[in-house]
Amino acid sequence: MAGHVVVVGASLGGLRAAEQLRAAGHDGPITIVGEEIHLPYNRPPLSKDVLADAGDDDVERLHAGLVFRRRASIDDVEFLLGRRAVASDLVARTVSLDDGTTLAYDGLVVATGLRARRLPLPGPAAGRHVIRTLDDALGLRSAIRTTATAVVIGAGFVGCETAASLHRLGIRVTVVDPFPVAFERALGPLLGGAIQRHLETAGVRFRTGTGVVSYTGSHAISGVTLDDGTTVSAGLVVEAVGSACNTEWLAGNGLDLSDGVLTDNDLRVLGVDRVVAVGDIARFPNALFGGDPRRVEHWSMPTDTAKRAATTLVADLAGAPVAAAPFAPIPSFWSDLLDLRLQAFGSPALGDTAVVESGDLDHLADGVLVTYLREGRLVGNVAVNLPPVRQRALRDAFLLPVS
């Protein structure tokens, strides 16, 4: 008997998990639970295309432009949207939802992903925004129509993409980050500093090496106070300060939830049977990068992990072995920042050395390639404004046998 599989999480990871379960031969019922009311949709455009969209704020119209096309193989999958998992008993194999429903399962896929972190700072609540969901983006779209100034807290990809979008819309935007250079954790100071200079030349302002201590204003935000005592005017603030893992519903089951959900190389959640994890909540070992378990928040991970996790879960439900080949996916992500298109392969953040292989960091728009090494071994490549044929070669550089 194939059994009932419950997928908790209705974003890209959950959708791909259902599709891959069918591809792996699971013909039993599948239920996908999602906290949002929307069918799975594409998130990267939220900080770019959605903000720049000149149309009205019709949710259905915007969602239609983002929704993922679903394979015919999952036409019979049940979606329970607008429901949140609040607890689980992984011994009894049940998941409890916020409406009082209890779902019994034979196999479970953990795909609850991340939520935007919020800053616990004093000051008014009105005017504070994050950008993780479609509803977040709609709220920000509405707010930017009535302001001329904005502060983005966080100089990572979401923060700088949002700042670039606001700048294109004519808003005076300042990016604040406690690190000395934008993208320092993700790309290192060499390339990160070059991108920051490029954005500054275009008119985006940066206040790096300083943090925010409070928000000013009576009923709504009018500015942010920095730890150096200065204040930056702002009609709104976007908090782009990272993410928190949605693992609370798994508490009490003896799992390692210290950073996402710890799994083995086959995406089995350690300490429990017939449970796998997918997407950026899964902390798994990858021999390409030393074998230490890590979460990866790159675009490619939901699809890559879903394929392996589905194969594992179908095998476990049947009592069969999983293929012996190690799971060694190559992370990849992309970003658009004004006239720059970044494409990355591997994990540049793991590098201890960055080398400019081609191009000039002072002329990023003309094309640059930066390679990242860790103890002399390739761990990442970042291409800026390079043609697709060059990008494919960067990915191929990682296609080596893994022992």
Image (cartoon, rainbow, N blue to C red):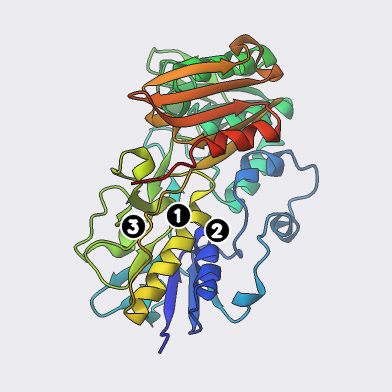
119 left or right of 62 in image: left
Q: Crowdedness of circle 3 by 10 Å Cα count: few (<14), some, many (20+)?
A: many
Look at discs 1 and 3 and give the one toward the viewer. Answer: 1
Residue 386 lies in what quarter of the image? top right
Depth check, front residue: 205 or 193: 193
Q: Which residue is mark 2?
A: 12
Q: Residue drawn at (37%, 17%), measured in percent from left and top?
A: 227
Residue 97 lies in what quarter of the image? bottom left
Q: x%, y% of residue 63?
A: 69, 58
Q: Crowdedness of circle 2 by 10 Å Cα count: few (<14), some, many (20+)?
A: many
Q: Which amino acid, mark 3?
A: Thr
Does 22 appear above or below 223?
A: below
Q: Which residue is mark 1?
A: 279
Q: Residue drawn at (40%, 22%), measured in percent from left and top?
A: 211
Q: CA distance from mark 1 to mark 2?
A: 8 Å
Q: Residue furthest bottom?
A: 1
Q: Are marks 1 and 2 in contact (CB under 8 Å)?
A: yes
Of callouts 1 and 2, which one flags the residue occurring earlier in the amino acid sequence? 2
Q: Residue drawn at (29%, 57%), measured in percent from left and top?
A: 264
Of callouts 1 and 3, which one flags the residue occurring earlier in the amino acid sequence? 3
Q: Residue drawn at (45%, 54%), measured in percent from left and top?
A: 279
Q: Which residue is mark 3?
A: 247
Does 205 appear above or below 318?
A: above
Q: x%, y% of residue 149?
A: 63, 24
Q: Residue furthest right?
A: 55
242 left or right of 131 in image: left
